[in-house]
Image: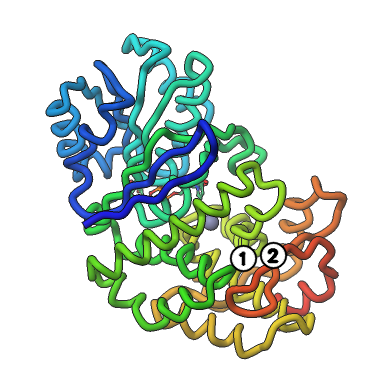
């Protein structure tokens, strides 16, 4: 059971494979791109469950896998770790025709992809995403980055992989909270541009999240297809790709206000952020308030947080959040750009949103 989705980017085009029992086919799928030594960059959690099947399949394809196991967590996406990873890769004797496999969530995809981009001015790589977030979002589109003390993802490049292998079976070992956090990005695709998908999710999401393989495959593949299409039209985010940031201006402020801690995972922040973006749209008379309620009801139904009151601990303060948003947007002439919506499935880029309306939504 698998589906293939093409990311159309001329000579940088590639295929996303989504399905069951794909890890054991990794070797066969990457054999056309790789030869000899194949470093497999992963983290300790993922290695524990999923490294061996990947390594075995690479060996079966006549390749020589070399695991490089990093510490799990966002803290790994930093210069010191990148340097160490590049050192290890160079010491392994990887040449310009080398090929690496990134096996893990968004953290591993981002740092291993960045390493592949700069090593010998760019080598080929495969993404084998193991979180729901990575399968539907971070593994598609070629963005790679690390964090600096100034903020998240501030140093990075675009470097498309040669292939993406998203095995939905690996999600079985993913903690429930991480699964739900990734689901927020799936709901996002429906909310921003596909009302029919959103309606399907309202009926089927809980079954898909509970492990129903057919529905899970459908949900992941449809999300990948939507991101792939948007990336195919706007690889460098000069326009349409920005729609993928629905809920993210609020989410980034919430993540900053909660110190990027376990208090709020990225997808949880995105869930709250999407509801706020729809409320802001309603406040500005752009979208019916009933669509905001519908979004909120759905996210609640899958047990995602939907409002500032759902953030554990002290409720984030409106002025602090606005401060973070202003800082985030300084690069854009001091104007607040939001992704707003005219209704479910109808998001658009609003470049000049009055701060008063944002404040009203945050203090409501
Ligand atoms: N490049 C992009 O376009 C893009 C897009 C969105 C997010 N991101 C980045 O992605 C990162 C977040 O990614 P994430 O949410 O996947 O987090 P993550 O990579 O930190 O993974 C979350 C946790 O799950 C564990 N894990 C991963 N797969 C597992 C599995 N199958 N079973 C058990 N445990 C597993 C990891 O070890 C980690 O502890 C952030 O750094 C973000 O900036 C990048
Ligand atoms: Zn996101």
Foreground residue among 263 and 124: 124
Foreground residue among 103 and 68: 103
The residue that mark 1 highlights is: 247
Foreground residue among 299 and 291: 291
Q: In the displayed structure, does residue 192 sit left or right of residue 108?
A: right
The secondary structure type at the circle numbered 2 is: strand
The residue at 26%/36% (across/down) is: 29
Q: In the displayed structure, does residue 170 sit left or right of residue 77?
A: left
x%, y% of residue 343?
64, 80
The residue carrying pointer 2 sits among few (fewer than 14), some (14 to 19) or many (20 or more) residues within 10 Å by Cα, namely many
Q: Are marks 2 and 1 in contact (CB under 8 Å)?
A: yes
Using the image, tell me which numbered label, if any, was put on residue 192.
none
User: Which quadrant is home to the C terminus?
Assistant: bottom right
Q: In 3D space, how far apart are the residues under numbered discs 2 and 1 (Cα atoms)?
A: 7 Å
Rendered view: 221 above or below 54: below
User: Sequence order check: which comes first, mark 2 or mark 1?
Assistant: 1
Q: In the displayed structure, does residue 362 sit left or right of residue 174?
A: right
User: Which quadrant is home to the N terminus?
Assistant: bottom left
x%, y% of residue 32?
29, 27
The residue that mark 2 highlights is: 339
Q: Mark 1: is the Cβ under 8 angstroms from ligand 2?
A: yes
The secondary structure type at the circle numbered 1 is: loop
Foreground residue among 240 and 138: 240
């Amino acid at each position: 059971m698998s589906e293939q989705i093409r990311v159309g980017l001329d000579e940088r085009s590639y295929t996303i494979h989504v399905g069951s029992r794909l890890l054991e086919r990794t070797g066969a799928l990457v054999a056309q791109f790789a030869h000899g030594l194949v470093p497999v960059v992963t983290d300790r959690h993922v290695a524990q469950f999923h490294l061996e099947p990947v390594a075995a399949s690479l060996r079966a394809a006549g390749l020589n896998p070399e695991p490089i196991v990093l510490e799990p967590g966002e803290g790994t996406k930093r210069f010191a770790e990148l340097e160490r990873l590049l050192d290890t890769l160079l010491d392994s004797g990887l040449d310009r025709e080398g090929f690496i496999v990134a096996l893990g969530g968004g953290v591993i995809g981002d740092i291993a992809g960045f390493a592949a981009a700069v090593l010998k001015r760019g080598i080929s790589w495969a993404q084998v995403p193991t979180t729901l977030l990575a399968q539907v979002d971070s593994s598609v589109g070629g963005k790679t980055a690390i964090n600096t003390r100034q903020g998240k993802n501030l140093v990075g490049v675009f470097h498309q992989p040669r292939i993406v292998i998203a095995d939905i079976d690996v999600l079985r070992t993913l903690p429930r909270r991480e699964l739900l956090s990734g689901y927020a990005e799936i709901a996002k695709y429906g909310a921003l541009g596909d009302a029919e998908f959103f309606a399907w999710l309202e009926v089927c999401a809980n079954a898909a999240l509970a492990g129903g393989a057919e529905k899970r495959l459908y949900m992941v593949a449809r999300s990948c297809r939507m991101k792939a299409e948007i990336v195919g039209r706007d690889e460098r985010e000069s326009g349409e790709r920005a729609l993928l940031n629905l809920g993210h201006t609020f989410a980034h402020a919430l993540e900053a206000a909660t110190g990027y801690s376990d208090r709020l995972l990225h997808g949880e922040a995105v869930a709250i952020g999407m509801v706020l973006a729809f409320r802001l749209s309603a406040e500005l008379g752009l979208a019916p308030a009933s669509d905001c309620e519908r979004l909120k009801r759905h996210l609640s139904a899958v047990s995602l947080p939907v409002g500032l009151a759902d953030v554990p601990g002290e409720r984030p303060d409106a002025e602090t959040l606005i401060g973070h948003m202003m800082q985030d947007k300084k690069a854009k002439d001091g104007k607040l750009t939001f992704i707003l919506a005219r209704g479910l499935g109808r998001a658009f880029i609003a470049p000049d949103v009055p701060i008063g309306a944002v404040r009203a939504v945050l203090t409501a």
